[in-house]
Amino acid sequence: MAMNKAELKKAYEQGLIDIEKYKEELFNLEIAPKPKKKQTRIYEAVPQDVFIKILKSAKKMHHKICLILAYGSGLRISEIPVLQKDDFDFKKKSIFIRQAKGSKDRETIMFPIKSPYFKQDYLRKIPIKIKGKQITTRAISKMFLQLSEPYNKVLYTDALGRPRYRYHFHSLRHSFAVNCLEAGYPPNYVQALLGHEDLKTTSKYTRISSADAVNMAISRGL
């Protein structure tokens, strides 16, 4: 079995291969065809009317906050539990995200979609805790699946027998991106709000399905 770079270096340092063999194998690794990266699933956006129904069905305020922060501000599920009151600026209508993915800080907007749902008194629930402990991403994900059940469905079952739903909590962040782009935000602005390293990651939200294209053509009488 071929060794990777780390294994080659270790073999060379232990004297198992000489310098020439080490260089030769490193060169072979560089020119070897790279395996295609498996495409990450792109979750469907949650329509605004469905989101409002899910939001209204949430009885607990901290559940509402989690939903709003993902759908209205594009937060990752991992960014919600660590939010602090000082991260919210109601004058600027912005949220400061500290040490997010890739250990990077960023700012995002506070619920740009027209809605009366996000209120300043929600801050009394920040940081979000359950029975004195920081809410977990697992609890957030479970909450979303329970609340979205009437509007969600299982698309398929994976190799391990786990159900894969049409909507996942990450679909709310996807919805934020789509809503911003449809509202006319330039893609590079949306990239900054989402905290994407590469604009290519943001560009996936601009893709439309063939069904969307057909519906648009019909609506325009084509």
Image: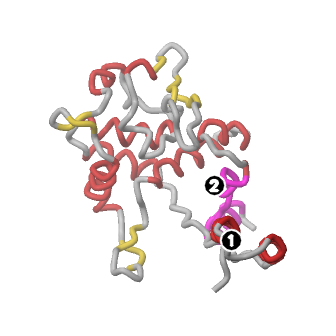
Which of 135 and 35 lies nearest the eye of the viewer? 35
Which of 129 and 184 lies nearest the eye of the viewer? 129
Q: Residue at 38% of width from left, 25% of height from top?
A: 84
Where's the C terminus, which quadrant?
bottom right
Q: Which residue lies under the disc numbered 2?
A: 205
Instruction: Tell me where the magenta segment starts and ends, as one range.
Output: 200-220
Q: Give the number of marks.
A: 2
Expressed as whole percent of the image width and height from the top left, the position of residue 108 reads: 56, 31
Residue 56's image quarter? top left
Q: Is 106 situated left or right of 34 in this image?
A: left
Q: What residue type is labelled 1?
A: Gly
Q: Which residue lies under the disc numbered 1?
A: 15
Foreground: disc 2 or disc 1: 1
Q: Chief secondary structure of the magenta span?
A: helix
Q: What residue type is labelled 2?
A: Tyr
State the separation of the CA atoms marked 2 and 1: 50 Å
Asked which secondary structure carries label 2, the reply is: helix
Whether residue 215 is in magenta: the answer is: yes
Which of 134 and 143 lies nearest the eye of the viewer? 134
Q: Residue at 66% of width from left, 50% of height from top?
A: 202
Residue 35's image quarter? bottom right
* Image position of 199 with respect to 186: above or below: below
Asked which secondary structure carries label 1, the reply is: loop
